[in-house]
Structure formats: structure tokens, C-alpha cells
Image (cartoon, helix red, strand yellow):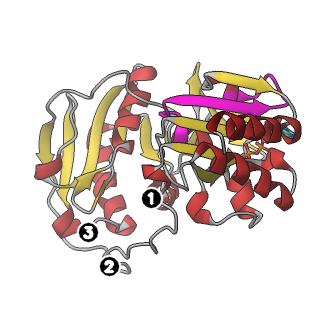
Amino acid sequence: MKALLVGEYRDGKLLGSTYELLAFARKIGAQAAMFLVGSEAALPRFDGPLYLAEAKAAGEFNPALHKQLLLQVIEQEQPELIVLAHSSYGWDLAPRLALALKCAQASEVLDYAEGAFVVPACNAKLRRTLKPASARTVVTLQAGAFSLPGEPAGTPEVKPLSIQAAAGGLEFVGYEAAQKAAVDLTRAEIIVSAGRGIGKKENVEMIAALAKALGGELGASRPVVDAEWLDHSRQVGTTGQTVAPRLYVACGISGAIQHLAGMKKSGFILAVNTDKEAPIGEVADVLVVADLKQFVPALTERVKALRGA
Ligand SMILES: Cc1cc2nc3c(=O)[nH]c(=O)nc-3n(C[C@H](O)[C@H](O)[C@H](O)COP(=O)(O)OP(=O)(O)OC[C@H]3O[C@@H](n4cnc5c(N)ncnc54)[C@H](O)[C@@H]3O)c2cc1C
């Protein structure tokens, strides 16, 4: 099987998600070629053809023009799969491509087995298996679902793409930095995070008390932020911050892949969950199967006593 991987480049840098596409291609045993609107100065490390359009000429974000360039490469390479990251770039480009190619599209792929793609359903509570009816499929990959076992290596064979004329309608103007987060969790050595399992806003205080006793920062999963129990600057995960503290305490967090992608590199992970089968157990060093309303205050008192606070 042949896969055309659509790498991502932003602000002069190749994005790490590009290597997740390579990991996916490797996992499914596909022969990989890559398309990138980027720069010679930031090439991906892999062995294979790399169709490169200069971002200076094509704009870093111009789905209409990038689609045109991609269609030329697809004509040449004839891949069965066109693979993008499930990012704002992929969300925009993938359906345009699928429509132009009149082929199937599978979004937010988590896994692949026997010609079928596994994708999340019902707000990630369930998984659905999709078997495309077309010979060619455009897929976007969920962030963090695939990773290379070691450091990427290799030298691509660069095939420059020339830009004849800009596709009308869109012009890449630039990026606008998001407002600086009120809390920088990326620097925290200890993070205690609240998940939906805390039940109600009033229980945030209980999690904050443990964070304070440990001398750490308070974090959160997305539902806690969506419910406005905590500010977005405290969200950990693919649409929040990526953290790697020495200690991460997950209170009432199930361990959805989007949360794990933001904290699985923590030094030591302690999870508190009533469900012993919760996926957080797969990355936790210790999973305490308990009601957090009993366990967390007891742990806080013990920590305070040990620290003489
Ligand atoms: C595009 C996209 C991006 C996303 N980005 C993020 C992101 O950045 N960060 C993020 O966190 N999520 C993100 N999500 C959402 C993610 O898919 C999950 O829905 C979310 O992480 C679940 O949060 P949770 O674990 O707090 O809640 P749930 O999945 O509802 O889990 C609650 C857990 O609490 C446990 N529990 C319940 N009661 C108790 C109790 N009394 N004591 C102990 N345990 C208890 C339950 O057993 C359960 O495991 C994203 C989703 C999408 C589609």
C-alpha cells in the first residue's frame, strides 16, 4: 500500500505531528511519500520522496492552493491513502481533498487493522470501525495516537514543487499569538489535575488543597474547563498544555487519548479513579481505586502532616 503523508510546518519549524504520520505509515506497512509546504531548512528525517513547496511562496496556511499542489502529487504518486494530522490544517484540507478525489474520508483515526480504521464516536466514549468503500481514502490521525519508537532518521529525496499561480480566495496573512496563559503548567514540577469525576465545581477546592499541600499546580481535563470550573490555562491535553512534571496526580480522569497526549511523559503518575479498568491505569505508575472524595482529603492531610504544615 502507498501512503502520501501531508507534513506540517509552522513559523519556520517542522511540526512533530509529521512524525506521527510516519509512525502510522510504518505501523500499517505502507510505503511512504511526503508532501510538505515548508522549507529546505527544516526537512523531515525519513527515507523517501518529499514533494516540497516553499512556504514563502505557497503560504503556510492556504488550503485552496495546498489542495491544488497535493492533487498534482496524488496524480503522480497514485497513493491509496492520503494521511494528515487531525489539526486545524488537516481539518480544513482533508475534506477538500476527499471531495476533489470523490473518495472516502476517515477522521481522527486511532488505529488501523485489516483494512479498517478505528475512530472515536459519542464524544470519545465509544469506538467505531470504518471500512472505506472507495479504493482511496483520506484520513486524519488523532494527535498522540501513533508515535515512532525511536528518534526519526533518514534523508528524504526532495522533489521541489513549483507554484504556477496562487489559488484565489485565500491569502495567508500570518499568525496571531494566543493570549499568554495565566498559568504556565509546562514549568510545574508537580501537577494535581481535576477531571469530570470530581462531580461538581465545589470539589475543585479539594483538588486545589492537595496541589497546595504538595507544592504543585492545579491542572484539569477538558470537561472541567468546558464546564467553566477552571480556566483554560489549566487544561492539560492536545487542546491544552503539554506537561512533563516529576509528579502528575490525575483525580477522576478517565485517560482519554487527548488527555494522555498532554501528560504521559510525566515522571511519576498517580491516578485516583473508582474504575479499575479506566484507561489512565495504562500509563499510571500507581492507580488508586477509590472515591476521590474520600481519598484526596485523606492524602492531603497525610502530606500536610509529613511536611509539618
Ligand atoms: C479534538 C479533541 C480535543 C480534546 N482535547 C482534550 C484535551 O486537551 N484535554 C482533555 O482532557 N480532553 C480533551 N478532549 C476530551 C477527551 O476526549 C475526553 O472527553 C476528556 O479527556 C475526558 O475527561 P475526564 O477524564 O475528566 O472525564 P471522563 O472521561 O468522564 O472520566 C471521568 C472519570 O472519573 C472517574 N470517576 C467518577 N467518579 C469518581 C469518583 N468519585 N472518584 C474517583 N473517580 C471517579 C470515572 O470512573 C471516569 O474514569 C478532547 C476531545 C477532542 C475530540
Residue 59's mark? 3
Q: CA distance from mark 2 to mark 1?
A: 15 Å
Q: Residue at x 74, y 47 (%)?
A: 195
Measured as percent of width and height from the top left, residue 280 is found at 68, 30
What kind of residue is marked 2?
Glu
Q: Residue at x 69, y 41 (%)?
A: 304
Secondary structure beneath label 1: helix
Q: Earlier in the sequence, mark 2 or mark 1?
A: 1
Please state the extent of the stretch shown in magenta in the rendering. Answer: 262-280
Ligand 1 closer than 8 Å to label 2 CB? no
Q: CA distance from mark 1 to mark 3?
A: 14 Å
**16 lies left or right of 53:** right
| Residue 142 visible from this viewpoint | no
Residue 93's mark? 1
**Residue identifier under label 2:** 171
Q: CA distance from mark 3 to mark 2?
A: 7 Å
Badge 1 crowding class, 10 Å Cα cut-off, few under 14, some 14 to 19, many 20 or more, is many
Q: Residue at x 43, y 34 (%)?
A: 80
Secondary structure beneath label 2: loop
Determine contact: label 3, label 2, CB under 8 Å.
Answer: yes
Badge 2 crowding class, 10 Å Cα cut-off, few under 14, some 14 to 19, many 20 or more, is some
Query: How many labels sit on residues?
Result: 3
Q: Is residue 118 magenta?
A: no
| Residue 300 visible from this viewpoint | yes
**Which one is nearer the viewer's eye here, 266 or 117?**
266
Determine contact: label 2, label 1, CB under 8 Å.
Answer: no
Residue 299's mark? none
Ligand 1 sits in quadrant: top right
**Which one is nearer the viewer's eye here, 70 or 307?**
307
**107 lies left or right of 300:** left
